[in-house]
Amino acid sequence: MPVIGQDRPQVISLLPMGHFCLRRPTLLLHLKMETKPELSSHHRWTTGQKIAFRFFFLFLTLQIFTENFLGNLFGGTLFIWRLGEKIFVRPCLWLNDHIFHFKYIPQSWTTFSGSLHTIRDTVYLLLAFLVGGLWTIVDRKRANYNKLFYWFSRFLVVALSCIVFAYGIIKVFPVQMSPPSRMGLYTPVGDLSPFNLLWTTFGYGRPYQIFTGFFEALGAILVLFNRTRVAGLLFIIAVMINVIMLNYTYQIGVLVMSAYILLIAFFLLAPGLKQLVRFFLIQQPAVLQQNEYVPGKNVATILLKTLALLFIGTSFTLNILFAYNRYTKTENINRSREYSLVKNYIVNSDTLKLIENDTLCWRFWSERVADGKRFVTIATMKPGLYKTYAIERDTLKRTLSLHPFSGNDTASLNFSYRDINKINWCLSGTSGQKNIKVELERINPDTIMNLLKTKRTIIVFDDESDSE
């Protein structure tokens, strides 16, 4: 059953472990989603329930309409990201400059700015408390918010499903954490940032990345249907708690956003939380009754349902296409890669020793093709120090012209090249006032690095093949 529309009567019964239906038929969990087509309910909410609803209505709405949410709903559309930054970031920074005075360092990608999250969340909290307080004074006599809660919950279900699916599908197509680069593998673990350490680990562990993405996407789909919504929310809660712990442990910039996704899931699960705890932990009979208000079938309801389905379908489709296109592009680039290890680095006829952390001598040469152009990354003996160039190759004259990829570097390099044999080749040219000759050996990194040589197996017959 879709998200927005009239709910059908349904009863789902679960029996706790250790009890048999014939002997203890009373220990059942009934999830009743009864159809009550009246426009309102006479059930009166407590004062605390009304205050809490007003606060979460305001605060969660503000969070969903920021670029961190909206920018991920349609396949990483940069237009939405930039628009969100203009609408939401600038007012928050103005308030910070004049009131809060948190230390904000501008980032090229605001998602990873921790201080910006603090500034924005402070503004949103104050705004939610202020408007919520005024709302409480003006509307203090209202008995309940059953109607508003129904529609707000449907809105949150759509937003939650789309954002969780977006994060899940880029793991199913394992592109969120890319496989570790050969340059990254030469970097000592102690020199990695926590972020790069986690990304390298998950990038190498593709099966686990796909596994976690599958359950994210599954939870996103399950919450769209009344019969499976509770199961979907439990999936999302379990996955997001794991994500939050990873984000905190490795200090990933989206820690706060993942916490708000978890908060939305708990908000949607809140009406039945006590009954779930009673059933699963105390093993007492429990009944989940939802939807004290359900709208009648009319033109407005059908229109909202149609718009919701179009929104969800568009979001899912664009995110699938975004992940698939990024995956195929990455795979094509990886297949085009060619690696050469530097054997000798000769300057003005002097063969220099390849000493670790030397910033002059090269370590390896890595070519690839991207968007129809060929590039090379030259890594030095100092881990993490490398430059990328666009290559112009003249196969008749057997020359290479290297043009810096970075706009800050304008010095091009020109070399002649020749093959010594099928494996070895060399470059000759000048850099500044020095004559350079580089002797290289074509390699397959998968055959020389223990990490890449390791084959994943379940049943092992030969230990020697897995050890060095």
Image (tube, rainbow, N blue to C red):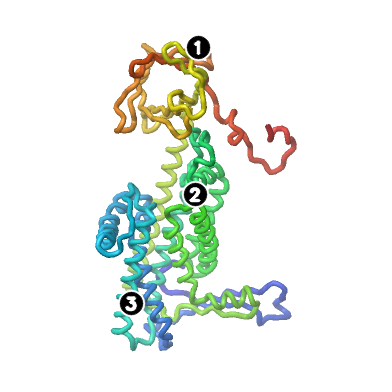
- Determine the image quadrant of residue 67: bottom left
394 sits left or right of 351 in the view: left
The mark found on residue 30 in the picture is none
Q: Could you say where residue 144 lies in the image, as x and y percent from the top left?
A: 39, 84
Question: Looking at the image, which residue is at 55% across and 29% down?
Answer: 445
Task: In the rendered view, tell whether residue 63 sits above or below residue 113.
Answer: below
Q: Could you say where residue 244 lies in the image, as x and y percent from the top left?
A: 50, 59
Q: Name the residue beneath numbered marker 1.
A: 420
Q: Is residue 258 visible?
A: yes
Q: Name the residue beneath numbered marker 3.
A: 132
Question: Looking at the image, which residue is at 49% across and 55% down?
Answer: 247
Q: Name the residue beneath numbered marker 2.
A: 171
Q: Nearer the viewer, mark 2 or mark 3?
A: 3
Q: Residue furthest right?
A: 461
Which of these two is toward me, 101 or 197?
A: 101
Q: Could you say where residue 436 lies in the image, as x and y percent from the top left?
A: 41, 15
Mark 1 near mark 2, Cβ–Cβ under 8 Å? no
If you read the primary sequence from the N terminus, does the residue marked by circle 1 or circle 2 appear first?
2
Label 1 secondary element: loop
Distance in Å between CA atoms under marks 1 and 2: 43 Å
Question: Looking at the image, which residue is at 53% across and 59% down?
Answer: 239
Which of these two is toward me, 380 or 452?
A: 380
Mark 1 residue type = Ile
Task: In the rendered view, tell whether residue 98 sits above or below residue 319.
Answer: below
If you read the primary sequence from the N terminus, does the residue marked by circle 3 or circle 1 appear first?
3
